[in-house]
Amino acid sequence: MKAANMDKRGGPSNFFQQVYSLVSLVPYGRVASYGQIASLLGQPRAARTVGWALHGLPEGSSVPWHRIINNQGRITNSNREDSIQQQRSLLEAEGVVFGPDGRADMSQYRWYGPTFEALDAIWRGCSGKSGTCSEEDDRAE
């Protein structure tokens, strides 16, 4: 990971952590766009940064990076064809269908985002998926 995307302890930046938390909420068989994730995190012009965050995930991460595609329903995962094929295979295994033009129908497969409570918890830096901070999460702040 680039130094600019690291916090003082050498871990991912707060924005990257927010990306990982939000992307982890995208359900099986649904997709979201890079710009949508950025907008939900209050940074509507940070779609590329969302891509960089996902590209920087360590091997074997549980974050479902493959569920993030571009707003037109296309996979735009770097310039490596094997990455594109891997992402498409993972999405197809979840039931996402791609048309002859290589697009998933965003009106059918788009995830519209979490509840306000879950999004608020991500903004506050809580790690739980419940949508609220537990007492343990509150102590960690």
Image (tube, rainbow, N blue to C red):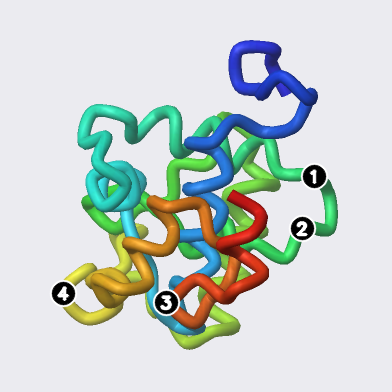
Nearest the camera: 14 or 46? 14
In three-dimensional space, the C-alpha distance between marks 2 and 3, rounded to whole angstroms, equals: 21 Å
Label 3: which residue?
131
In three-dimensional space, the C-alpha distance between marks 4 and 2, rounded to whole angstroms, equals: 28 Å
- Are circles 2 and 3 on residues that touch, CB within 8 Å? no
N-term mark: 1 or 4:
1
Question: Where the N terminus falls, by quadrant?
Answer: top right
Label 1: which residue?
58
N-term mark: 4 or 3:
4
- Give the side of residue 34 with respect to residue 28, left or right: left
Label 2: which residue?
61
In three-dimensional space, the C-alpha distance between marks 3 and 1, rounded to whole angstroms, equals: 25 Å
* Rendered image: mark on residue 107: 4
Label 2 secondary element: loop
N-term mark: 2 or 3:
2
Question: What residue occupies the far bottom of the structure in this picture?
Answer: 95
